[in-house]
Amino acid sequence: MPKTPIPETAPLECAKALKKNYSALIAIPCCNESSNLPEVIKSLELNPIELTEHTLITVNVNNRSSENSSDNLKTLEWLKLYSGPLNIAFLDSASKGFSFPEKFGVGLARHQAVMSSIEYLRSKALIISLDGDSPVNKNYLEAIFNFQRNNPNFGAGHVNFKHRYDGNSEEKKAIKIYDQHLHDHRLNLEKADSPHAWYAIGSTIVCTKEAYLKSGGYNPRRMAGEDFYLLQQLSKVGYKIQMIQDAFVYPSNRQSNRVPFGTGKAVTDILENGEWLTYNPKCYQVLKRVLKTIISNTDLSGQSLLKNLPEESQKWFHDKKLPEVWEKLKLNSNSQEALIQRFHEWLDAFQTLKFIHFLSDEFFPRVKIEL
């Protein structure tokens, strides 16, 4: 059965004339956020004017054609009347004609926001992802621009985050638990020397215009997980995913079942179950031993390499045909550095997560998070 064609992008609208050399684009997908988007815009207005004047903000107001668009129409009216200091453009992907087919969602919304505006960016511009319910701190742009200036080879990364602790005591506890899970997972991957130690949160991602185009950008067909896969693709085309510590975004902690995973779903599950089980630290210790073995034994054959891996990992890597894969990687690599890079492209972020799930299921059961 043929795939549904990628929908046409709505015309880019704006109150101000757009320039051709913005230093950054902030791309915001927005669905039913009429009560939240003004707060996000206000937080950006608090950033230094000398930075915001060089930044384009594009909001893609979207819904599927089968969905009620009344809230989005309110957002569009607000955007049309906006007269503040920011350079705001928007896409009307909510009204009839440009609303999304059923099989499209946030991946398409993010990608359209970027590609509709990319011609207005200078060659070394930054593409910054944000959400319509996620305000930022007042030195957000300053921290991002300073990081690029101090790291001339920067291509891809993410800012810091802290979910807002709104709601009753149980809701606050739920988001604190999930926050702890996210922070622990990234930190433990970093301790294991994994190159995939990053947060996959859509409202935190930053990359250069060049990196976005080279990686293929957001997959417009992804209904969820588009953030994870963009970072993975950026990594696979050679960019180190770096963290911008001093730029903060404050995502919403509201419950949601809009997608099968992520913050909204996690908060809902924690409130229903009263707890959240995270990965046992021993899983990361095995991962660290695996990576150390690989890097220290690049001269070994695939079969010998498999035998040298930690016992708990051998079945998983055998089932993934590591011996055959390793020989192909060696054949197609002209240096040790290239071989290791290709290995990490094979054991990518998704496969690393699957490996940790295997260890969790077979050897080291998940553990309860204690605050």
Image (cartoon, rainbow, N blue to C red):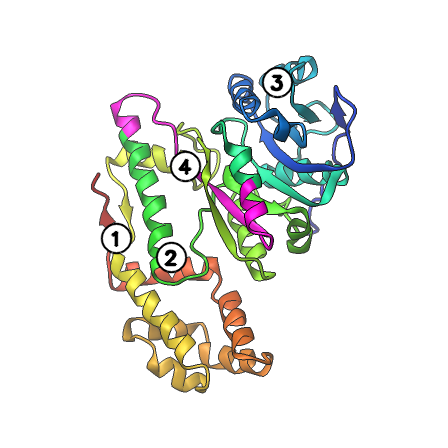
| Circle on res. 75 | 3
Q: Tag 4 or tag 1, which sits nearer the N-term?
A: 4
| Circle on res. 263 | 4
Amino acid on which the number 2 mark rests in the picture: Glu
Determine the CA span between mark 2 and mark 4: 22 Å
User: Do the numbered discs 1 and 4 sit on residues whose CB atoms are within 8 Å?
Assistant: no
Image location (x, y in percent) of residue 341? 53, 69
- Can the viewer see residue 5? no
Q: Tag 1 or tag 2, which sits nearer the N-term?
A: 2
From the viewer's perspective, is 290 left or right of 369?
Answer: right
Residue placed most toward the observer, 39 or 10: 39
Q: Residue shown at 70%/51% (left/top)?
A: 2
- Can the viewer see residue 346? yes
Q: What residue is pinned by disc 2?
A: 190
Vertical order, 250 against 293 (above or below): above
Residue placed most toward the observer, 11 or 258: 11
User: Do the numbered discs 2 and 1 sit on residues whose CB atoms are within 8 Å?
Assistant: no
Amino acid on which the number 3 mark rests in the picture: Thr
Q: Tag 4 or tag 3, which sits nearer the N-term?
A: 3
Q: Residue shown at 54%/81% (left/top)?
A: 330
Labels in figure, total? 4
Vertical order, 279 against 250 (above or below): below
User: Do the numbered discs 3 and 2 sit on residues whose CB atoms are within 8 Å?
Assistant: no
Element on which disc 3 rests = helix
| Circle on res. 366 | 1
Determine the CA span between mark 3 and mark 4: 24 Å
| Residue 119 figure quarter | top right
Q: Tag 1 or tag 3, which sits nearer the N-term?
A: 3
Locate the C terminus by quadrant.
top left
Determine the CA span between mark 3 and mark 1: 42 Å
User: Do the numbered discs 2 and 4 sit on residues whose CB atoms are within 8 Å?
Assistant: no
Q: Residue shown at 33%/55% (left/top)?
A: 188
